[in-house]
Amino acid sequence: MSDSDTETRPVSEDEGEGLEPHHDRDNRLTPDFVDAVLDHVEDGDAEGARELVRPLHPADVADLFELVPGDRREALAGALAELLDGDVLAEMNDWVRDEVLRALEPAQVAALATELDTDDAVAIIEDMDEDEQRAVLRALDPDDRAAIEEALSYPEESAGRLMQRDLVAVPEHWRVGDVLDYLRRTDGLTNDFWEIFVVDERHHPVGTCKLSWLLRTPAKIPLGDVMQREQTLIPVDMDQEEVALRFQKYALISAAVTDDSGRLVGMITVDDVVHIIQEEAGEDVLALSGAGDGDINEPILFTVRTRLLWLVVNLGTAIIAASVVGLFQGEIAKFALLAVLMPIVSGMGGNAGTQTLAVIVRALATNQLTSSNTWRMIAREFRIAAANGGSLGLLIGLGTFLLYHNPMLALTIGMAMLINNLIAGLAGVLIPIGLDSARVDPAVSSAVFVTMCTDCMGFFSFLGLASLLLV
Amino acid sequence: MSDSDTETRPVSEDEGEGLEPHHDRDNRLTPDFVDAVLDHVEDGDAEGARELVRPLHPADVADLFELVPGDRREALAGALAELLDGDVLAEMNDWVRDEVLRALEPAQVAALATELDTDDAVAIIEDMDEDEQRAVLRALDPDDRAAIEEALSYPEESAGRLMQRDLVAVPEHWRVGDVLDYLRRTDGLTNDFWEIFVVDERHHPVGTCKLSWLLRTPAKIPLGDVMQREQTLIPVDMDQEEVALRFQKYALISAAVTDDSGRLVGMITVDDVVHIIQEEAGEDVLALSGAGDGDINEPILFTVRTRLLWLVVNLGTAIIAASVVGLFQGEIAKFALLAVLMPIVSGMGGNAGTQTLAVIVRALATNQLTSSNTWRMIAREFRIAAANGGSLGLLIGLGTFLLYHNPMLALTIGMAMLINNLIAGLAGVLIPIGLDSARVDPAVSSAVFVTMCTDCMGFFSFLGLASLLLV
């Protein structure tokens, strides 16, 4: 791996150009193109399929496999085998890659893994069964195997799994010219890096230097004068979500990874972090709705199980809310209009609660909401809830009065609307903050509790007030 | 701007180290630290405040301003004025920056803007009132003014606003050594870049070259042999969301921006795109819940207006759903238990619909769902809905039978649950796909329609079946 040339350009070949006809205006492969490739495969014309696919970027080849139906992927993998390099696999959805890899021998997988940086090879191998993993590792050469085995020894989703071990580290006492000579003359160095790391005699990082600074500085200047001493160090066991937040906050391109004793053991580059930033930011909407990872490529039984579990939990809270209605069966039997209006109060509370919840969950996820501004945020949401609850209460109260000419009914629904909006605002801010400070992911667990509050209180406030004022 | 040294390190100063005591374990400034700074400001000890803040990274200084209450920001800006450089402003939330800038003179803002790359200067200036904008532009030197005015001529949220004009472009016929000489000997070049762009005689991009490749290749090799010809070109009017998707899909560090005639006019770097990736991915949860931008720093009246608009639209759909219940008032008056059980059916449909909706909205946003796999996805969601609806129907039917010993009531609620889950699954997939193909943002508009479907059909299927089978 360390001396592979996957991304290097020693001599350029006939690359790219003319990708565009295969893409729609959103840069997705067109259905016509996907069908054309599949037709070639079906007709046994593997070379025809390869001819179409060869000009594509590895990311687009990976997309192609994701876009074809699951039962066609093995045949496609067979036809395109010689185009299936490590870069394509690294870009592929985990579930789809599993299907494709199952069609290959361990030796073929090992050959693919050898082409890749440690981090990409680990991403491919970590999802395999233990047996397959062992078979692939046996087929690797000893250096690559040691590197991958060490990476696999770090926790899943940690910096240790994300980092690559190929980096350039030089001593602080060098001059800029020494670094340039070293880079040009040393065999076996990685060819793809954006910054070099400066280390002391214990191999602890003391600074970084962008390549553009090296190129713009006279050779005789000491490295210590041009490097940046302030840097963000990533502990090897840091969670990948934390890593992504650091890259984003400090606009990093690459960062040094250090072990427990502070030694430089690897580097993480922004291209490996970008998809984590996107996933972590996008997963809140999936978590809040109980859709798990929401991966459209996962096996359907897996999806059913994930979603059903969440729905059963919600069924429990729906039954609790229904039992609140049950307390007022007598009132409803006397005055069935109450049953017509009560879902408006509970539903609007649910909507308001979801708004607050979404804002607070995002603010927590992006580190904008901290203990410094928690009280300010609670007060802010309470004021918003009062303003919106008051407006909605007036609106629905007025409407009810005009429709039914019953002032007490209008007062009942208006007040219930205000009360339930206040409950929604408070539940929407207090529940996620409470869960977060208990180190429970607020995106996963908050929605159930907030909806239970707004359902129960919506029914209770409306039917309770009705039993006092009306029936 | 073009010859500024904001990020360059000619000679290093006493930087960083020891940031950690001010940060909690999530790398957020501690409340104690924030309070200590504010105490110094309140006591009129501006130098004491500066001493605390000086070691912080610009991103953390920006965070500090966001974490203090709105009415303390002006005083804080006054005390920290000399630390308030362009980098700090570029990292600051738009609303907070507006407050801080309002405390400064146009000449001061112009001085700050001059330090920055075009894209960061534009980000600061584009949010100002037209009068303020003009005043700041007048205070800039002519070159900077021309660059910023040109950037402002591109649409908001387009590549033209994101790009910087300082880049390194060289002709294809050079050798590697020519490039190195040019970089070392030319004054006025930018110091911060990750790749160089290779252009033809019309200044059209023909390739890119990572700096690490230049540093690892012998000087006599022609540039055309080491550069990569395949590259992602960004049209200057491309929407920033599209730009972010390209950076992510192709793992770009920087990309060339071209005008209508294909000339190279600027470059976008990944650090300017990372926060867009995060925002765009995170905004789905806010849009689906009707919370607008969900920015906790926006003025409270603005927030109230955004959220109330959405709630009023939802009130309309809630009233429509209630009118469905109204059709069955007679049945409810006779059998009040129906009113107790009906919210379970509608609510569970809402939950299932939201799950599907979240998955589909994410799949659309990340370009995973295209016309190639639309039908497959609809069939997939229908099967999931049938499995979950069947399971939940059995569960609630059985529970109802055990509790009330009424087989027809059990059958009614079980069947209604199945029907409403199927409706939820279909609405959750068809509505966002339909909106997306009509070029309407599915995240913003889908939830209202899906909830209306599940509410109305939940009530109608349960109460309708009850009127047939029970009452």
Image (cartoon, coloured by chain):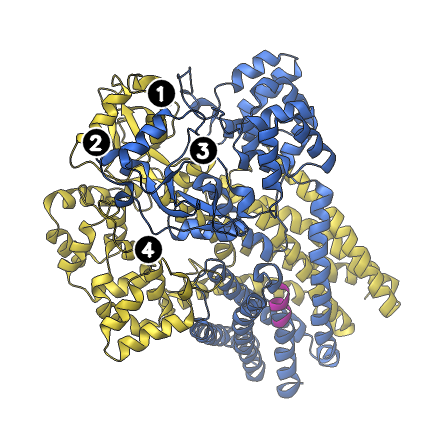
Chain colours: A yellow, B blue
Question: Which subunit holds the residue at mark 1?
Answer: A
Sequence-wise, which precedes: disc 2 or disc 4?
A: 4
| Mark 2–mark 4 distance (CA, rounded to whole Å) | 31 Å
**Contact check, label 2 and label 1, Cβ < 8 Å:** no
| Mark 3–mark 1 distance (CA, rounded to whole Å) | 20 Å
**Relative side of B301 to B437, left or right:** right
Circle 2 sits in a helix, a strand or a loop, which is it? Answer: helix
| Mark 2–mark 1 distance (CA, rounded to whole Å) | 19 Å
Judged by depth in the image, the label closer to the viewer, 4 or 1, is: 1
**Contact check, label 2 and label 3, Cβ < 8 Å:** no
**Contact check, label 2 and label 4, Cβ < 8 Å:** no
- Of the numbered discs in the image, which one, if any, rests on residue A250? 3
- Of the numbered discs in the image, which one, if any, rests on residue A226? 1
**Viewport quadrant of the C terminus of chain B:** bottom right
Query: Are the residues under marks 3 and 1 on the same chain?
Result: yes
Circle 3 sits in a helix, a strand or a loop, which is it? Answer: loop
Identify residue type, mark 3: Tyr
Q: Position of residue B394 (x, y in %)?
A: 48, 76
Q: How crowded is mark 4: few (under 14 residues within 10 Å), some or many (20 or more)?
A: many
Residue position for label 4? A91
Q: Where is residue B116 in the image (x, y as percent from the top left)?
A: 53, 29
Snapshot quadrant of residue A2: top left
Sequence-wise, which precedes: disc 2 or disc 1?
A: 2
Circle 4 sits in a helix, a strand or a loop, which is it? Answer: helix
Residue position for label 2? A184
Q: Does the magenta stretch include residue B451?
A: yes
State which region is magenta: B448-453
Identify residue type, mark 1: Val
